[in-house]
Amino acid sequence: MKQISSTQNPYIKSLVQLQDKAKARRQSGTFLIEGQREIMLAAKGGYTAETILFVPDMISESQVRELSQPDTELIEISRDVYQKLAYRDTTEGILAVAKTKSLSLDDLKLGDNPLIMVAEATEKPGNLGAILRTADAANLDAVIIANPKSDMYNPNIVRSSVGCLFTNQIATGSTAQVIKYLKNKGISIYCATLQDSTYYHTQNYTTPTALVVGTEATGLTQEWRDASTKNIIIPMQGEIDSMNVSVAAAILIFEAKRQRGF
């Protein structure tokens, strides 16, 4: 089995680039996954692990082999190398280099009555990760990112989603592309926005539905408001007129799930 102990190893340097640069991920078609649960969920979600790197005194080879796939290369690395690559403070001593997937709208597989979350231009990876966790908890049919601000394989998104990047159907596209897709599929569009809105709990989400949230700073673009079946709002009873986008998304999602009988 191959062993790497130096942080100056060219391959390790290339993996650092993979962590830090969207361009490197795009050009190579690969990204890094950290942690046993995340690697397991990625495999269940159809992702291919090309390589698994592990620290032998932090995780056993037998555990690593359970997480590997038939063609996965295994590499032993030193703690120094691992710390160079790992993002977490609490570590498990294992990383995988996995192939990215197409996130095209055309690749989504939807049933007859889908419930979809759409997030437009979400700026913070942590918020996007939280939305993916909620989407997994609610077993949504898909999450669509309109006008994404970063690639979905950004390590901060991978980490903050705690593996839910791999458990959800995800697609990305421009706002215009996403609106066209939803309308072609006959999916009603409910936009969370302050303008011309009605309370979210008064609407019917039991038919094919897309719930759409925008940025905390500026909300949804006019394009979404024009395309909306209905604009909806969460009643605010304090001093401010908005809340964290991932919290707002969770409220809308579980109201829809409640109407659908969970």
Image (cartoon, rainbow, N blue to C red):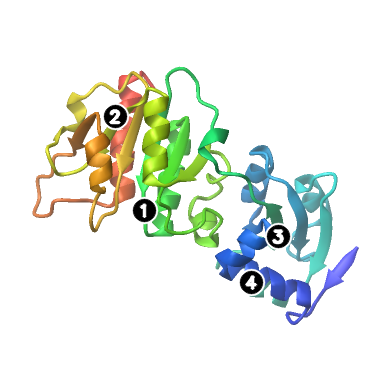
- Horizontally, is 41 left or right of 261 in the view? right
Residues under labels 1 and 2: Cα distance? 23 Å
Lower sequence index among marks 2 and 4: 4
Residues under labels 3 and 4: Cα distance? 18 Å
Q: Residues within 10 Å of mark 2 (few under 14, many from 20)?
A: some
Check disc 1 and report the residue beneath it.
121
Lower sequence index among marks 1 and 2: 1
Q: Residues within 10 Å of mark 4 (few under 14, many from 20)?
A: some
Residues under labels 2 and 3: Cα distance? 38 Å
Residue at horizontal 68 percent and vertical 39 percent from the top:
46
- What amino acid is labelled 4 in the image? Gln
Residue 224's x, y, as percent? 27, 41
Residues under labels 1 and 4: Cα distance? 24 Å
Looking at the rendered structure, the secondary structure element under dot 4 is: helix
Check disc 4 and report the residue beneath it.
17
Q: Quadrant of residue 77?
A: bottom right
Q: Nearer the viewer, residue 31 or 80?
A: 31
- What amino acid is labelled 3 in the image? Ile
Check disc 3 and report the residue beneath it.
94
Give the quadrant of the N terminus: bottom right
- What amino acid is labelled 2 in the image? Glu
Q: Is residue 206 above or below residue 196?
A: above
